Image: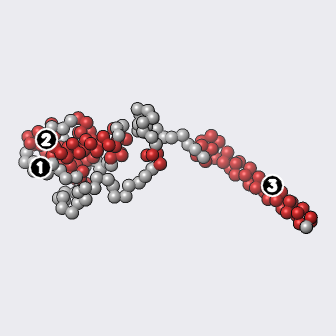
Amino acid sequence: MHDVADASEATGLLENLTAKQVEVLDLLAMHRTTKEIARELRIAPNTVDQRIAAVRDKWGTVNRKDTARLYARLVELCGKSTYDFSRIDAGGGEGDDDEQDLPIDPVFVLSDARPMARHPDWFDTRMPEPVGLEAFDAKFGRVGRVAAVFVLALMMAVTLAATLAIAQALGKLL
C-alpha cells in the first residue's frame, strides 16, 4: 500500500483515477456493498468489482477495506469532504480477510435472481407490483379485507354444515 506523504502526491494518485472509478470509490468509502453501489450507479455488480480491482492494481492495495481507507486518506489530504470516513478502521492488513471482498453472511433476495438482460434498464429500482394479500389490500383496503375474512368464514361454516349433513346421511344408510 502507498505511504502518502503530502497533498501533491495524494492529488497525483487521485488524478490518476477515472471519473467512474471515483464514483465507485466514493460509495465504497461510505461502506456500501457491491450490490448497493451497482444499484445506485445503475451498473452491473461485476462492473463495480472491476473498477475496484483496477484501483487496487494501480495503488497496490490488498483488499477493498485498504482501498477505501487509502482513498479516504487521499481525499482528506487534498482537503476535500470525507463523509465521516473515521468509521473505517485504521488497522493494518494483518489478520484481515484479505481475499474476502463479499460480506461474510450474504443475504439472497429473490429479486436478485431476476434475469438482467431483458432490457437495458437492468437495475430498475421501482417497487414491483404487489401480489397476494398486498394486491388485495391495495385494491380493496382494510374494509375489503374484513369483508373477505367474513365471506371466507361463512363459506367455511357452509362447508362444515354440508359435510356434517353428508356424514349424517351416510350414517343412516349404514
Mark 3 or mark 1: which comes first in sequence? 1
Q: Is residue 37 visible?
A: no
Q: Which residue is mark 3?
A: 158
Q: Which residue is mark 1?
A: 2
The residue sitting at 26% across, 39% down in the picture is 23
Residue with the most extreme top position: 120
Depth check: give the residue in front, 132 or 90: 132
Q: Which residue is mark 2?
A: 13
The residue sitting at 25% across, 41% down in the picture is 51
- Pointer 2 with pointer 3, Cβ within 8 A: no
Depth check: give the residue in front, 118 or 122: 118
| Percent x, y of residue 72 | 20, 47
Q: Secondary structure at mark 3?
A: helix
| Percent x, y of residue 142 | 64, 47
Q: Secondary structure at mark 2?
A: helix
Q: Amino acid at mark 2?
A: Leu
Q: Is residue 115 visible?
A: yes
Mark 2 or mark 1: which comes first in sequence? 1
Q: Secondary structure at mark 1?
A: loop
- Pointer 2 with pointer 1, Cβ within 8 A: yes
| Percent x, y of residue 132 | 60, 46
The quadrant in which the C terminus is found is bottom right
Residue with the most extreme front position: 174
Determine which quarter of the picture holds residue 161.
bottom right
Scheme of image coloration: secondary structure
The residue sitting at 9% across, 42% down in the picture is 9
* Marks 2 and 3, how far apart at CA: 77 Å
Q: Residues within 10 Å of mark 3 (few under 14, many from 20)?
A: few
Q: Amino acid at mark 3?
A: Val
Query: With 5 as the anchor, is 117 left or right in this view?
Result: right
Determine which quarter of the picture holds residue 6.
top left
